Amino acid sequence: MPDIAVLWEDWADRSLPLPRYETSGAAGADLRANLRPEDREAGVTLPPMGRAILPTGLRVAIPEGYEMQIRPRSGLAVKSGVTVVNAPGTIDSDYRGPLGVALVNLSDQPYIVRHGDRIAQAVVGPVVQAGYVVVESLDETARGAGGFGSTGRG
């Protein structure tokens, strides 16, 4: 299991929990909205179809050979229509900037993100970098060039 080094932003509320797995079988560690001091009381309102990058108050160092994927929380998506815009968002091992979560409100009602709310989950996994080689032709498969929806249902 790799260790993820975590650095608090200077302004961050350190009383909020670090990312953590809520159950022993959880694949993702919950990320919380760590709002800037001026936003903590009112929260951040996402209007219908509105997008915003919500701060976590953290910076991370992911070991080389790994990535962190930022994924939606299913309950938030189903109950409120709020999800991660670029799901999954990828945090590369060489990124050291602020860890933000790009959320979108797909519902027809405004949604308020409160300070400390669980807004996404982080999944850490190995990365394999591939080489790309130009060839004259590709091998044949049973599927061939069949694209979106070509394999049918079930």
Image (cartoon, rainbow, N blue to C red):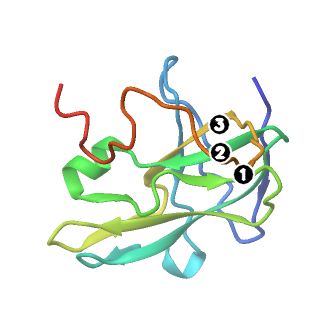
- Is residue 19 shown left or right of residue 79? right
Residue picked out by circle 3: 124
- Is residue 58 shown left or right of residue 21? right
- Specify the amino acid type for callout 3: Val
Kindly give the residue lying farthest to the bottom in the view shown. Answer: 38
The 10 Å Cα crowd at callout 2, few under 14, some 14 to 19, many 20 or more, is many
The image's mark for residue 68 is: 2
Distance from the alpha carbon under mark 3 to that under mark 2:
4 Å
- Would you say the residues marked 1 and 3 are in contact, meaning their CB atoms lie under 8 Å apart? no
Tell which circle, 1 or 2, labels the residue nearer the N-terminal end: 2
Q: Secondary structure at mark 1?
A: loop
Residue picked out by circle 1: 134
- Would you say the residues marked 3 and 2 are in contact, meaning their CB atoms lie under 8 Å apart? yes
- Specify the amino acid type for callout 2: Met
Q: Secondary structure at mark 3?
A: strand
Q: For residue 111, what is the image quadrant? A: bottom left
- Specify the amino acid type for callout 1: Val
Q: Secondary structure at mark 2?
A: strand
Tell which circle, 3 or 2, labels the residue nearer the N-terminal end: 2
